[in-house]
Amino acid sequence: MKVILSNQSEYPIYAQIREQMKEQILNGQIAEGTVLPSIRQLAKDLGISVITTTRAYRDLEAEGFIASVQGKGSIVLPTDNKMLRDMYRSQLEEHLDAAIGISRQICMEDGELLALLKERQEMRGSRG
């Protein structure tokens, strides 16, 4: 696990940790079942407050990325779990609603919006 913090970032430290860990979990750099460093150890390694790492881990747990297991620590959950998928689907729906709203404001036809979506998928390496 690698976490790089920036004091220049617009995001607070806990959010930087959370987002970097989420990305590493989702892309497989941190595998399902991995036991993460303890909150205290991560705080020490990064030279930050235990309160900050606690917030990052709490957020990751609330979002379904990790689970705290008594006596074992925090463990990475499978990324195909339903709660995680539902959360991301909800976020995707919100972004699509915003895109639809903008397309309506500029009188874009539905076919043009769908073509734009397909073009963006191809640019980013669509999965099908």
Image (cartoon, rainbow, N blue to C red):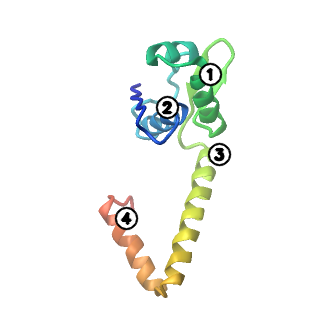
Give the number of the disc on residue 51. 1
- The 10 Å Cα crowd at callout 2, few under 14, some 14 to 19, many 20 or more, is many
Check the image and report above or below for 108 versus 98.
Answer: below
Which of pointers 3 and 1 lies earlier in the amino acid sequence? Answer: 1
Residue marked by disc 2: 17
Kindly report which numbered mark, 4 or 2, lies closer to the viewer in this rendering: 2
Image quarter where the N terminus lies is top left
The residue mark sitting in front, 1 or 2, is 1
Q: In the image, what residue type sits under mark 1?
A: Ile
Q: Amino acid at mark 2?
A: Ile
- Quadrant hosting residue 55: top right
Q: Position of residue 37 (x, y in %)?
A: 51, 17
Circle number at residue 121: 4
Quick one: label 4 or label 3, which is nearer the N terminus?
3
Q: Pointers 4 and 2 in contact (CB under 8 A)?
A: no
Q: Secondary structure at mark 3?
A: helix
